[in-house]
Structure formats: structure tokens, C-alpha cells
């Protein structure tokens, strides 16, 4: 019975191919758009999640300079007020597991005939703990390297690729701003940061070396920022309070005076960023779903036309013994067939579009089975929902009136 | 006539509701028809013949009176049960053939069997058998538009017969056909009536068509004006 009706649905769809195709087109575009946008949204979310994971957990960042200064917003870290001493003092606070001062700057690197301009970060060995960053080769520099400001460096993967190619960099000497540095280790791949920078395009050197030998004039004993890792997420609020207190004390600030530093909860910021991408992709998905709705209305429209056109046929069917539910099923099957075939093509279009977007723009796309299944189920539901009213209209026709219809 | 009547009608009336108020199309019809009868219904245009056939075929419901088909008062049946009657007990033949233009003759003839829940192989077998019976066995794959009106009416009869009905209702089945083709179609009805005992009720405007039947009912102005046996001289001279 169902198979007989399915083949009738095919027949009547085939009887008006262009119209059937145009109706399906609505579904194709709707489903394709939903899948494409979900793929892009999921891709963005994947990148954000990945960079959050690469950032390190339970992180604070303490920046030089206040967040506002006399109503004029200053560039954070513009006037360095934080010192290595501050970092050491923070490390003594309860609930803090690791602290790494940061003195970053840009410098030209040379090895052999290759040169590369990159970010050089002066820091301490605990930076690797704070950032949860492992070495893929060699060994990290030590606290004694920091104490004696030796010229040693850890290279990120991008730097290795550009300076050394396939050569093993460990034990080689590179030049940073013309001075020789011994490469002691290579960092593992980290990928993109939340703000889209390539984290592997950086070099780590002892903070003291950076202050005294590389960026001397710029920092003069200060650091631009201090990265702080709390022992656990529960420790973060208390740690933030005690850090603020400690630094105000150490900087001898009056009760009323504004802080000359800013403590930021990076983990909270990252979670906000993740939440934002999630909301964005959900919103885009919702907007794309509207096209599914429009496709559904297209189906309903055509089914209504079709029911009216075929009034006489319906009358004949009733006269020879079709029950209401037979007629209902027939038209419902037709609507569902249109929407499911349209949906299948839409799935292919959406996946193809996502792959194309990935090829052309290098944007990350993630096609999940669940989004395909969801689009499919929504399409079937749209077929049932928008096909039901026309089908019911057909099923409820009075036989003699339907037969009299010209 | 003996046994239970196939149709028993008493005090049947039908009013059409129009904007100008109810229009009486049939009033106080009383009629009993036994299995195996061949009844011709005649009457001037607008006298209520089609209205009556639609009531007999359970396509419409009467405004008053009672109609029993096969001993069942149809008023007590729900829509699905009425559909079952139309599917399995009654075979309808229309003046305008009413075939589905989109599907081939086999599928047209097999259509009632879909609603009877018969499987595809069995449907096709029986449809082919029916087409053979009406002399169109070779045309199964054709579309209705590819054959003549007389042939289309034969297909419609094959469709009416496929679910082995006890009653054939035909509203002006030869109305669109020339007299030669009409007589062929009537020959088919006569054969079904005589050889298989199927009750046939048909509406016609032509005396020579009516003469194929053995009982004549005449409607005038919504009333049953005459009910009696058919005189067979006219048929004899024409045939
Ligand atoms: N749907 C309708 N609405 C209103 N009045 C109708 C309707 N159908 C038929 N009538 C009226 O009912 C009466 C009987 O019509 P019916 O079609 O039964 O006549 P008929 O005997 O079949 O005529 P004909 O020989 O022309 O086919 C007519 O007066 C007609 O105008
Ligand atoms: Mg009529």
C-alpha cells in the first residue's frame, strides 16, 4: 500500500518536473545553508576550544598600568610598573601554583642565511608550567640561566621551520639582534591563540637576558606582564583578591589611589569568548533555519495548488473506495518525498559548500553527523508539518463536489 | 424475484442547500431492487437521476428517508465503512469515464485494489484479466488519452468490475458515445448481468439503450413516475 503510494508520489512529482524541482530547491537551499553554517560555526568553536586548551588552565594575567587612567584609557602594559620581584612575591601567595613574568618584544633572528622576525618572550622556566607547554626536543633553560642571564633560547615550531627547515636546531647557535644564543630546546606545537595569533611563532629566553641584553632600554628591570596560574578553579577568586592586595602594598599605593596594574582572569575571558562563539553559531543556525521554514512554506504552497488541481482525481479515488486516511497519506507522502529528496541534495550541497569554504578561505569547518541528522529530521518534520494541512484538505473533500470539479 | 433485496429505499428525499434556500431534487422515493436485476433509469434533464445515483453509490447522503444496501442501513455506517462499500460492493461507471490521465490503463484498472490492500503482483494480474475481458488486453501500458472514448469507457467498466462488486451503477455511461459503440458497451453490461448475476442500474436518455434492461424506472421532477418492465420491440428493431 505504502509502496504503491510512493510510486504514485513519484509519478505525480514527475508529471510536473520543473515545479517539483523548484519546490525542492527551497528545501535544498535551506538544508544546505543550515549544514554549511553549522559547519562554519562548529569550526570556529573548535578553534576557540583548541586555543583555550592551549592557553593553560586557571590563568590570570597581571598587566602593567591601570585599566582606566583619569578617564583616558591607556594601553595596558604601556608604562611597565611590574617587576620580577612582584612575580616572586605572587608565587608565595596561597592558592597559586605557578608564576611567570613576561617581557615580550620583537626581534630579528638569523641562522646561517635564513632570517626571521618574531616575538621573543623573556620569562622564567615556570612559563612552561603556566602555559602547559611541553618541549618536543632538548631541555628547558633553568632558574640558574635566569639568575645569570645566559643567552639561551627555546624555539617555537614556526620559528624552527623558518630558520632551520628540516635541520635539528638543538645545540645550534642563532643570532637574536646580532648576539649569539644557544638553542637548548624546541617547543611543541600550540596552534592559534584566541586572538588568532600563531603561538608557535615565538622564542622564549630568560627574562633577565631579555631585560638586560635584548630589550634593555625598554624594560629597565620591569616586565610587561606576569602570568599566574591558580592551583584550581576554586582558588581563583581568593587568589585574585590577594594578588590585588599584595601588589597595591608592594607598589605603596594610597587607599584612594588607582592601581597601576590590572589583574585579568584569562580563563573567565576565554570562557566568555567560547560562550560568544557558541551563541553566534546558534544564532546563525537559527537564521539559516528560517530558510528551512521558507522552504517548508514553498512545499505547502505547491501542495495546496496540487490538491486543488487534482480535486477531480481525489473525487475519483474516493468514489472507488479510498478512505480519508488513504488520501491523507498519499498527499503527505508526496510532501515528505519532496522535502526529503530536497534535503538529501541539500546535505550534499551543504557539505560540498563547507569543503569549498575550507579550501578557499582556510577557515576551519567541522561537519558533525549530528548536524546532518538534525537537518534531515527537521526537513522530514517540515514535510509532515507543511504537508499536513493540504493533505487534510484533500482528504476531507466531499466526493460528489470533487467529482463535479472541472 | 426472491431472496433479500440488494437495494431497499423508502421515503427517500434529497434537498440541495443553495444560497437561495433548499432545492428539492428528490422527494419520497420508494424502490426495491433485487440481486440480478438490470434497471434503466430515464427522465428529463434535472429530474434527479444523477442525484439518485449518487445516493445509491454512497457518494452523497439523503436528506430524508432510508436506504438499505445489502440489508444494511447506510445511515448507520461511518465514512470508512462507506468507503469499503464503494470499494468492494459497488462499481461506479461515469459518463465522463473519469480515468486518471497520468497513469496507464493497467494501473487505472488496478486502482480500487490498492485501497482494498491487494499486493502489486495480484493487482496487476487481475487488472490484466479485466482488460482482457473488456477486449483491451493489449493496451495495458497505454495512457487513457491514447485510446478512444468507447475504449476508455471499457477501461472504466474494467475498473468498476475489478473488485468483484455485486452492483454496477452507471450514470449515462453511453452519453458521450456514438450508437454503435454504445451498443457494444451495453452488450458488455448485459453479459455481466446475465452471466455473472451482477445487478446493473444505469441512467440513460435513450430508449434503445434503456431497452437492454429488463426494468425501467422513470423520474419526473424528483418523483418516481413510472416503474415497470421494459418492452423489447424497440431494441429488436434497432439491434
Ligand atoms: N450540487 C447541486 N446544488 C444545487 N442543486 C443541484 C445540485 N445538483 C443538482 N441540483 C439540482 O437538483 C436537480 C436534479 O439534478 P440532477 O443532476 O440529479 O438531474 P439529472 O436528472 O441527472 O439531469 P441530467 O439528465 O441533465 O443529468 C436539478 O434541479 C439540479 O438543478
Ligand atoms: Mg445527470
Image (cartoon, rainbow, N blue to C red):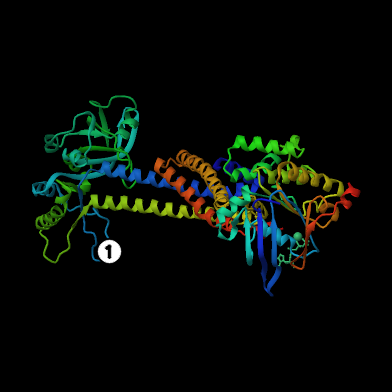
Q: Nearer the viewer, residue A207 or A280?
A: A280
Q: Nearer the viewer, residue B237 or A1?
A: B237
Mark 1 neighbour density, 10 Å: few (under 14) some (14–19) many (20 or more): few
Q: Nearer the viewer, residue A232 or A114?
A: A232
* Direction from residue A292 to residue A319 in the image, left or right: right
Q: Residue furthest right?
A: B237
x, y (%) of residue A344? 51, 42
Does residue A364 appear in the picture of this structure?
no
In this rendering, is residue A97 above or below B169?
Answer: above
Q: Residue at x 83, y 52 (%)?
A: B211
Ligand 2 in which quarter? bottom right
Q: Residue furthest front?
A: B2
According to the picture, the residue beneath numbered tag 1 turns out to be A72
* Direction from residue B4 to residue A286 in the image, left or right: left
Question: To which quarter of the image does residue B192 belong?
Answer: top right
Q: Residue at x 58, y 38 (%)?
A: B119
The N terminus of chain A sits in image quarter: top right
In this rendering, is residue A26 above or below B119?
Answer: below
Question: To which quarter of the image does residue A56 belong?
Answer: top left
Amino acid at each position: 500500500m505504502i509502496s504503491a503510494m510512493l510510486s504514485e508520489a513519484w509519478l505525480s512529482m514527475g508529471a510536473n518536473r520543473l515545479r517539483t524541482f523548484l519546490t525542492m530547491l527551497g528545501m535544498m537551499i535551506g538544508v544546505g545553508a543550515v549544514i554549511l553554517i553549522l559547519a562554519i560555526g562548529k569550526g570556529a568553536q573548535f578553534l576557540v576550544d583548541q586555543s583555550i586548551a592551549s592557553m593553560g588552565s586557571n590563568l590570570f594575567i597581571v598587566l602593567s598600568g591601570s585599566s582606566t587612567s583619569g578617564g583616558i584609557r591607556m594601553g595596558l602594559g604601556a608604562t611597565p610598573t611590574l617587576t620580577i620581584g612582584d612575580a616572586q612575591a605572587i608565587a608565595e601567595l596561597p592558592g597559586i601554583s605557578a608564576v611567570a613574568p613576561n617581557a615580550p618584544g620583537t626581534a630579528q633572528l638569523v641562522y646561517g642565511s635564513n632570517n626571521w622576525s618574531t616575538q621573543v618572550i623573556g620569562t622564567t622556566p615556570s612559563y612552561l608550567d603556566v602555559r602547559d607547554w611541553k618541549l618536543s626536543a632538548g631541555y628547558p633553560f633553568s632558574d640558574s640561566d635566569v639568575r645569570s642571564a645566559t643567552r639561551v633560547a627555546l624555539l617555537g615550531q614556526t620559528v624552527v621551520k623558518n630558520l632551520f627547515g628540516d635541520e635539528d636546531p638543538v645545540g645550534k647557535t642563532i643570532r637574536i639582534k646580532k648576539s649569539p644564543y644557544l638553542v637548548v630546546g624546541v617547543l611543541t606545537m600550540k596552534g592559534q591563540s584566541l586572538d588568532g595569533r600563531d603561538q608557535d611563532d615565538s622564542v622564549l629566553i630568560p627574562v633577565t637576558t631579555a631585560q638586560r641584553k635584548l630589550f634593555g632600554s625598554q624594560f629597565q628591570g620591569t616586565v610587561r606582564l606576569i602570568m599566574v596560574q591558580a592551583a584550581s578553579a576554586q582558588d581563583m577568586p581568593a587568589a585574585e583578591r590577594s594578588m590585588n592586595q599584595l601588589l597595591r602594598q608592594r607598589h605603596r599605593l594610597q587607599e584612594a589611589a588607582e592601581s597601576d596594574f590590572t589583574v585579568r582572569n584569562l580563563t573567565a575571558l576565554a570562557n566568555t569568548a567560547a560562550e560568544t562563539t557558541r551563541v553566534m553559531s546558534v544564532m546563525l543556525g537559527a537564521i539559516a533555519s528560517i530558510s528551512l521554514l521558507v522552504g517548508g512554506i514553498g512545499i505547502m504552497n505547491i501542495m495546496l495548488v496540487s490538491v486543488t488541481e487534482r480535486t477531480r482525481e481525489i473525487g475519483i479515488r474516493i468514489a472507488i473506495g479510498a478512505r480519508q486516511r488513504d488520501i491523507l497519506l498519499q498527499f503527505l507522502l508526496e510532501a515528505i518525498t519532496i522535502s526529503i529528496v530536497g534535503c538529501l541534495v541539500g546535505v550534499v550541497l551543504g557539505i560540498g559548500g563547507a569543503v569549498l569554504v575550507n579550501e578557499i578561505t582556510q577557515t576551519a569547518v567541522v561537519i558533525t553527523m549530528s548536524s546532518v541528522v538534525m537537518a534531515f529530521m527537521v526537513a522530514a518534520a517540515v514535510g509532515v508539518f507543511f504537508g499536513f494541512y493540504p493533505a487534510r484538505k484533500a482528504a476531507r473533500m466531499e466526493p460528489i463536489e470533487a467529482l463535479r470539479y472541472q | 424475484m426472491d431472496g433479500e433485496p440488494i437495494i431497499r429505499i423508502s421515503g427517500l428525499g434529497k434537498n440541495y442547500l443553495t444560497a437561495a434556500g433548499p432545492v428539492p431534487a428528490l422527494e419520497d422515493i420508494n424502490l426495491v431492487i433485487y440481486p440480478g436485476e438490470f434497471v434503466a433509469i430515464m427522465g428529463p434533464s434535472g429530474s434527479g437521476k444523477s442525484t439518485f445515483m449518487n445516493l445509491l453509490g454512497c457518494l452523497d447522503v439523503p436528506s430524508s428517508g432510508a436506504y438499505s444496501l445489502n440489508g444494511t442501513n447506510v445511515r448507520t455506517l461511518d465514512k470508512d465503512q462507506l468507503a469499503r462499500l464503494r470499494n468492494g460492493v459497488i462499481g461506479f461507471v461515469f459518463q465522463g469515464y473519469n480515468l486518471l490521465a497520468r497513469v496507464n490503463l493497467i494501473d487505472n484498472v488496478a486502482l480500487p485494489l490498492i485501497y482494498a490492500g491487494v499486493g502489486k503482483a495480484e493487482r496487476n494480474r487481475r487488472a490484466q484479466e479485466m482488460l482482457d475481458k473488456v477486449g483491451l488486453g493489449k493496451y495495458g501500458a497505454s495512457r487513457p488519452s491514447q485510446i478512444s472514448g468507447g475504449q476508455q469507457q471499457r477501461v472504466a467498466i474494467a475498473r468498476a468490475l475489478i473488485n468483484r462488486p455485486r452492483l454496477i451503477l452507471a450514470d449515462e455511461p453511453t452519453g458521450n458515445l456514438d450508437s454503435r459503440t454504445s451498443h457494444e458497451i451495453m452488450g458488455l453490461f448485459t453479459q455481466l448481468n446475465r452471466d455473472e448475476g451482477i445487478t446493473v442500474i444505469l441512467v440513460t436518455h435513450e430508449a434503445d439503450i434503456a431497452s437492454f434492461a429488463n426494468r425501467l424506472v422513470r423520474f419526473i421532477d424528483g418523483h418516481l413516475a413510472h416503474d415497470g418492465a421494459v418492452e423489447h420491440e424497440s431494441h429488436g428493431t434497432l439491434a
